[in-house]
Amino acid sequence: MAQTPPSSRSSTPSCSNRPLFRIPIAAIDLTVRLGARYCRTLSGQRYPGLTRSEGITRTVDGISRSLDHAERRGVTLCLENHYKDGRWRYPEFAQPQDIFLEILDRIDSPFFGVQYDPSNATVGGYDPIAFLERVKHRIVTMHASDRYLASGATLDDLRQADGSLGYADELRHGETGKGLNDYDAIFRILSSVGFDGWISVEDGMNGLDELARSVTFLKDKWASISIT
């Protein structure tokens, strides 16, 4: 699984985003060179002044144009319910659940699906399990993360950090299986629809030992759900 660089499909309200189409095209070609079949894509930053309607239109147009190339190369684009890239000042345009779902519903292609990240749903202020139920038939890849908020921090603190570069200090990565996510429920839902795609571990911020424990947890959890 590869990913497009963190460009902004939605772009700023005042600029043309045509040159940005070269970026996902190059990422798709690199995906093929690496022997992968999935490439994550994003909607871009939620810039001040960008309206909901304009942002959705630009995102759908950009992904649709990228899909023309992806389909020819046999690559599936995966739209992640994303929080924010480390080099961005503003959160993902499609971070709100309703915007993400509208974009998803507007694009019908066997080469387009969802990269599900349960932690990002929590950060976005919506239920990761209810969201999973809504998109379970469109999921092609998954980020197995387990974020948590620093002691005393709230989701409102994250929103107040909009405009600052990178991740908010209040948001932490943790060992998978020890955070806020209900992996029993998540894996039961994925198993119920026959999911057999990639699950990538989003961990390792605190060393390889923690990453190894995350991998072991996920393997054991998936095996236990698949048996029942």
Image (cartoon, helix red, strand yellow):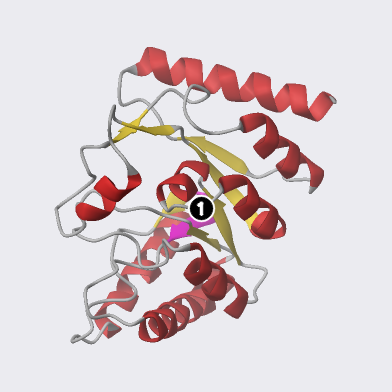
- Expressed as whole percent of the image width and height from the top left, the position of residue 54 reads 37, 86
**Residue at 40% across, 16% down:** 210
Position of 72 with respect to 43 (left or right) is: right
Instruction: Out of 223 and 160, give the one closest to the viewer.
Output: 160
Instruction: Out of 157 and 122, give the one closest to the viewer.
Output: 157
Position of 171 with respect to 192 (left or right) is: left
- Expressed as whole percent of the image width and height from the top left, the position of residue 147 reads 40, 34
Instruction: Out of 42 and 30, give the one closest to the viewer.
Output: 42
Name of the residue lying farthest toward the left? 164
Q: Is residue 37 visible in the rendered structure shown here? A: no
Circle 1 — which element? loop
Could you say which quadrant of the image residue 13 lies in?
A: bottom left
Mark 1, Cα crowd under 10 Å, few <14 / some 14-19 / many 20+, is some
- Expressed as whole percent of the image width and height from the top left, the position of residue 149 reads 34, 34
Residue type at numbered disc 1: Tyr
**Residue at 42% across, 21% down:** 211
Could you say which quadrant of the image residue 57 lies in?
A: bottom left
The residue to which callout 1 is attached is: 126
Position of 118 with respect to 137 (left or right) is: left
**Residue at 39% across, 12% down:** 209
State which region is magenta.
33-41
Let me know if residue 34 is in the magenta part: yes
Figure quadrant of the C terminus: top right
- Expressed as whole percent of the image width and height from the top left, the position of residue 5 reads 31, 58
Instruction: Out of 129 and 166, give the one closest to the viewer.
Output: 129
Query: How many labels, in total?
Result: 1
Q: Is residue 30 above or below residue 192?
A: below
